[in-house]
């Protein structure tokens, strides 16, 4: 049920259907219907393919499409996939060196108001144990307990080890630990580190939490420079060569 608007003539394999609008329809409306079709993905799997029942799926009528869809500026996404640096950098995994987390971060427990005190309104992000939306699950007017420019890391549950760069002052639950860098960290380096931190999630669960003591002793493997120190400049440049980096 992955669905996409094809704006140019194309060839295809046999494992898909193509849908042609029977009435005039804008590109915005077609993209909206792609989202509607994807929302039915849960109905199908290898044992139940989206073939004979595809034509019976119910979708919103054209006159019920939200007005904001028709006014969406889809041209704004034309260059979204560009990279900041037109270069290819090889990441040699065999050359990565281990560092303790406590050697590169100050690690503290998350702080903020109780969840029951929140109503979703406020000027500051509230970060909790989530793997979506940069970990932000609500808003608050409570004075921010954590500064911008840090990484939030979930310590337990299904979202353990989810790591996000926080670019604004924020509050959080105690299920999130705050990694404050002991070096000059920008958002590109932070995203490189977040990707590595997330790789740790297979080690932990509800029965084995990633608490502060374990975090401090855990190892993170990083590219190094000629002095065997973390090569922060390489990490920054590597992220900037990736597709979509111009949109960070």
Image (cartoon, rainbow, N blue to C red):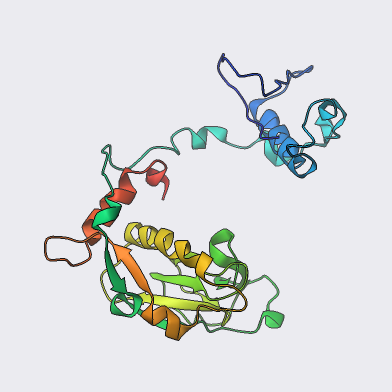
Query: Residue 73, image x and y in percent?
Result: 57, 36
The residue at 83%/35% (across/down) is: 59
Query: Residue 184, image x and y in percent?
Result: 26, 69
The residue at 56%/66% (across/down) is: 135
Q: Nearer the viewer, residue 188 or 105?
A: 105
Query: Residue 123, image x and y in percent?
Result: 56, 71
Query: Residue 119, image x and y in percent?
Result: 71, 74
Residue at the left extreme, as displayed = 226
Left-right relation of 131 to 228:
right
The quarter of the image holding the N terminus is top right
The residue at 84%/25% (across/down) is: 52
Q: Nearer the viewer, residue 72 or 233?
A: 233
The residue at 56%/34% (across/down) is: 74
Q: Quadrant of residue 28?
A: top right
Residue 230 higher or lower than 4, as above or below? below
Left-right relation of 143 to 230:
right
Residue 147 higher or lower than 14, as above or below? below
- Tally of marks: 0
Q: Nearer the viewer, residue 42 or 6?
A: 42
Q: Quadrant of residue 41?
A: top right
């Amino acid at each position: 049920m992955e669905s996409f608007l094809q704006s140019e003539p194309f060839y295809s394999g046999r494992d898909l259907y193509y849908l042609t609008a029977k009435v005039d329809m804008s590109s915005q409306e077609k993209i909206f219907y792609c989202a509607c079709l994807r929302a039915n993905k849960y109905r199908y799997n290898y044992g139940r393919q989206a073939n004979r029942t595809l034509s019976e799926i119910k979708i919103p009528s054209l006159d019920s499409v939200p007005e904001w869809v028709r006014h969406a500026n889809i041209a704004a996404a034309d260059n979204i996939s560009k990279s900041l640096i037109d270069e290819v950098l090889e990441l040699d995994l065999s050359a990565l060196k281990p560092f303790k987390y406590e050697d590169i971060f100050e690690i503290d427990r998350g702080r903020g108001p109780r969840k029951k005190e929140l109503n979703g309104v406020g000027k500051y992000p509230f970060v909790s144990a989530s793997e979506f939306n940069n970990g932000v699950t609500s808003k608050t007017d409570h004075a921010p307990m954590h500064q911008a420019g840090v990484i939030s890391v979930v310590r337990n549950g299904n979202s353990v080890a989810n790591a996000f760069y926080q670019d604004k002052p924020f509050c959080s639950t105690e299920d999130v630990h705050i990694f404050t860098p002991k070096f000059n960290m920008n958002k590109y380096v932070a995203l490189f580190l977040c990707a590595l931190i997330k790789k740790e999630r297979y080690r932990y669960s509800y029965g084995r939490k990633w608490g502060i003591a374990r975090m401090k002793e855990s190892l993170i493997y990083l590219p190094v420079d000629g002095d065997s120190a973390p090569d922060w400049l390489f990490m920054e440049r590597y992220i900037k060569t990736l597709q979509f980096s111009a949109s960070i």
